[in-house]
Image (spheres, grey):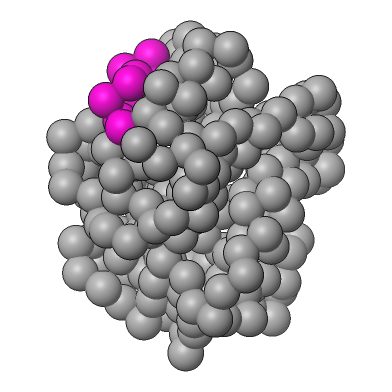
Amino acid sequence: MKDLCKKLQVTADGSHTLFIPEMDEHYHSVNGAIQESSHVFIQAGLQQLMKTNARILEIGFGTGLNAFLTLLNTNIPVEYYTIELYPLPLDMIRSLNYGKMICPEKEELFFALHIAPWNTPVKITDRFTLHKIQGDSNTCTLPENIDLVYFDAFAPDKQPEMWNQAIFNKLYQSMINNGILTTYCAKGSVRRMMQEAGYSIERISGPPGKREMLRATKSYSSLR
């Protein structure tokens, strides 16, 4: 993954994504990178929290789009944890147009997310503290008392090692009661693994170009 070629592409909403030819895989939906991230993680996840503060865990930091959108859309203090094994180089990050498209006056905050050192907490704004963890989500220790998980690994048929029973079990144990997990994926095999871990599952409307996505809740009724 680290040494694979990544090509910049424009998606349907005008925002960039990265394409990996060797995997035939994109970092985001070609139907709109910003639209997808906003729908799957902000609208279906962040905006569902009824909290005065939040601890968020993202599986797959990637381009930093989900973190940037969270920073811009939160009105409560957020501790944001994100795990990434292969960080993107800064020259590639500088080529992405998210800052200019979403909030030009705060574009420097997008770059601040990437410049921030790994494996140490960094206060990006008064309401947003970033904890970037460089490692493998399957093997590293997860933070505890997580309110919201963004599960944003590459698709199961492209990166099957990231979609397994053990990781969903780990995530379930790391979350608070009533914690939420969102993912763009709607595959039956993924839904069944989440149910086996103990989550209550909803199939909800997906982002542009995708009929459904999954939202999982660690509810009292699903506790083992």
Q: Relative to 174, is 150 on the left or the right?
A: right
- Residue 79 found in image quarter: bottom left
At a point 33% along the width and 21% down the height, the residue shown is 165
Provide residue 38's location: percent of width, then percent of height: 71, 52
Asked if residue 147 can be seen in this view, the reply is yes
At a point 33% along the width and 61% down the height, the residue shown is 145
Q: Is 165 colored magenta in this rendering? A: yes
Q: Relative to 36, is 5 on the left or the right?
A: left
Q: Name the dominant secondary structure of the magenta segment.
A: helix
Q: Relative to 203, is 91 on the left or the right?
A: left
At a point 41% along the width and 22% down the height, the residue shown is 196
- Residue 201 found in image quarter: top right
Q: How many marks?
A: 0
Residue numbers of the magenta segment: 160-169
Asked if residue 21 can be seen in this view, the reply is no
Q: Residue furthest bottom?
A: 126
